[in-house]
Image: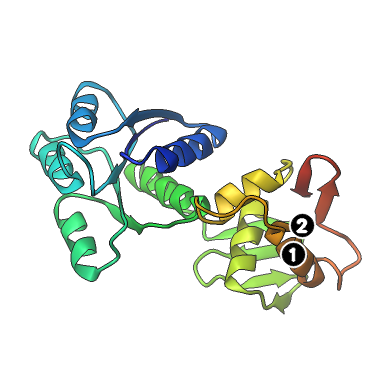
């Protein structure tokens, strides 16, 4: 799968590209609107992530010109602006989804995956299950062994990330980059704190533990 990121901020672009490449995607970067439009007209991409505030040509214009050229690549619009008017303008220009900055990579990846499924007419799963633990992706309800577990929004995002990567070791850095915002302080101990709280709810009341620490590497759910 090929994804183009049209973003002039180097830090944001590097953050997105690193995460997508870890998730198995091929990425191409354009630092301004004109270059991004040229690359999209001359290459083949499965999804485009396009910032609005771009040099040379703004994101709205890029999207409009893509649609005028009959290029139907799904577009995820990025913007530091979060007003209803900007969201409407981005969608009316031909964007397929809209994500405001700052954002957590987990949400960006989920939106890209949803665009890919929509484009390929694949039915999106509504639940994730690991052992006797299940989360409903629509209602955000969590159950284990038939019992309802109440968790906070940030705990839910962390749990969903672990479940989507069940059987794979995820490092503290990967968790911060995927669950928290791209400008989050990597020196914080919030991962350990949130993981401890999550274990209190997901594992402590049950005999079989699902979240495991792999010393020197990170965490794994299995």
Residue 123 seen anywhere in this rendered image of the structure: no
Seen in the picture, residue 99 relative to 19 is either above or below; the reply is: below
Crowding around mark 1 (Cα neighbors within 10 Å: few <14, some 14 to 19, many 20+) is few
3D distance between C-alphas at marks 2 and 1: 24 Å
The colour mode here is rainbow
Give residue 144's quadrant in the image.
bottom right
Residue 151 in the image: state x and y as whole percent.
66, 74
What residue does disc 2 label?
131
Crowding around mark 2 (Cα neighbors within 10 Å: few <14, some 14 to 19, many 20+) is few
Q: Residue at x 58, y 71 (%)?
A: 153
Mark linked to residue 80: none
Q: Which secondary structure, mark 1?
A: helix
Marks counted in the figure total 2
Residue 165 in the image: state x and y as whole percent.
65, 46
Q: Residue at x 67, y 64 (%)?
A: 134
Residue 135 in the image: state x and y as whole percent.
62, 65
Q: Could you tell me which quadrant the N terminus lies in?
A: top left
Image position of 202 (left or right of 72): right
What residue does disc 1 label?
193
């Amino acid at each position: 799968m090929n994804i183009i990121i049209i973003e002039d901020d180097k830090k944001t672009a590097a953050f997105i590209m690193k995460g997508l490449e870890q998730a198995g995607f091929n990425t191409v970067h354009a630092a301004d609107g004109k270059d991004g439009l040229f690359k999209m007209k001359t290459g083949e991409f499965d999804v485009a992530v396009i910032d609005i505030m771009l040099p040379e040509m703004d994101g709205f214009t890029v999207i409009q010109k893509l649609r005028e050229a009959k290029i139907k690549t799904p577009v995820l619009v990025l913007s530091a602006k979060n007003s209803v008017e900007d969201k409407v303008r981005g969608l009316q220009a031909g964007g397929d989804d809209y994500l405001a900055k700052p954002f957590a990579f987990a949400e960006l990846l989920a939106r890209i995956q949803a665009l890919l499924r929509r484009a390929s007419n694949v039915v999106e799963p509504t639940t994730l299950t690991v052992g006797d633990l299940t989360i409903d992706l629509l209602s955000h309800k969590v159950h284990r062994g038939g019992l309802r577990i109440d968790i906070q929004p940030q705990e839910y995002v962390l749990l969903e990330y672990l479940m989507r990567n069940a059987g794979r070791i995820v490092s503290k850095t990967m968790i911060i980059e995927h669950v928290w915002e791209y400008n989050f302080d990597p020196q914080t101990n919030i991962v350990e704190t949130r993981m401890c709280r999550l274990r209190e709810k997901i594992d402590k009341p049950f005999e079989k533990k699902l979240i495991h620490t792999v010393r020197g590497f990170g965490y794994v759910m299995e």
